[in-house]
Amino acid sequence: MDETEFDRFAEEYRAIHAQNIRLSGESPEFFTEYKIVDVVREMSAAPTLMNPRILDFGAGVGSSVPFFQRWLAPSMLVCLDVSRKSLAIGQERFRGLADFIAFDGRTIPFEDNSFDLIFTACVFHHIPHEHHERILEEMHRTLAPAGLLVIFEHNPFNPLTVQAVKTCPFDENARLIVPGKLRRAIASAGFQQPRIRYRIFFPGLLRALRPLERAMRWLPVGAQYYIRAEK
C-alpha cells in the first residue's frame, strides 16, 4: 500500500466510488453498511464480544465509523490507514467517534491482544500478494484470544466486479485475490477455521430477491466475498 497513491483520491473518494458502482443501483453507504451487518451476524454467536474493541484496517476516510457506532457500539474503534490525508478527513468527519492512526505498512502500532474484532474491507487487493501473510501475522498478534477476523474482498470470479475494478481510478494497481488463496494465507498466519462467504448476487433493481442470498453464500459468483476466522 502506498500513502501517496491514496492521498490523491482522499477528498474525492466517495464521488469516485459512487460513479464507479452506479450500475449496481446502490450507494457507497449500502456497500459499507451491509458489511458491518454481516459482521454483526458473525459475532452474534459470541456474546462475550459485546461492545468490542475494533480495528478497521485500511479504513480510509472512515466511512465505516457511523455504521460501527449504529450496529456494534464499540468500546474502542481504531481506524488505521497508510494515507494520512484520508485519516485527517476521517478525523474531521467523525471527531470523537474513533481514533485515526497512521500505519507504516509493516507494524500495527498496538500491543498483543488489543482487539476483539479486526475488520478490513477491500484492502488486501491493494497490498502486494507476497506481503499478505506478514500483514495477517500482525493481525493475529494484535487480535485477542477468541477474537474475530473478517476480511471482505472483490470476487475475481464475477465479471462485473472485474470490470468495475478495471475502470476504477483508485484500483489502478489492484490485484484481485482468489478466495482460496486468501483463505490459505489466513490459515498460515495462525488463524483458525477460516470460512468463505460470497455476497451481493442481485443489483439494486432486484433487491427484493436479496433475502435469498442467505442460502447462496456458498456460490462463488457473488460480487464480493468475505472470509471470517478466529484466533
Image: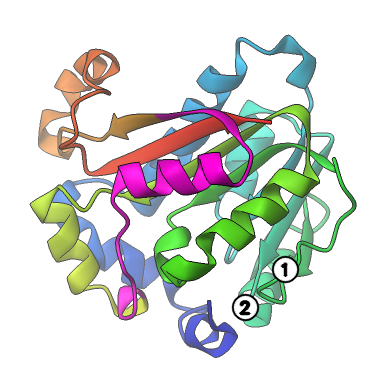
Q: Does residue 154 lie above or below 76 as drawn?
A: below
Q: Point out the frontmost of discs 2 and 1.
A: 2
Image x and y of residue 162, in percent: 17, 60
Rendering quarter of residue 14: bottom left
In the image, residue 28 lies at what x, y percent? 37, 53
In the image: residue 152, left or right of residue 223: right
152 to 117, vertically: above or below: below
The type of residue carrying mark 2 is Ser
Residue numbers of the magenta segment: 171-195
> Does 185 lie within the magenta span?
yes
Look at label 1 and name its amino acid: Glu
The residue nearer to you, when weighing 181 against 82, is 181
Q: In this view, does 92 lie above or below 220?
A: below
Mark 2 burial class by Cα count in 10 Å: few <14, some 14-19, many 20+: many
Answer with left or right where residue 199 lies relative to residue 203. Answer: right
Say which residue appears at 50% left-offset and 32% top-offset: 228
Dot 2 corresponds to which residue?
83
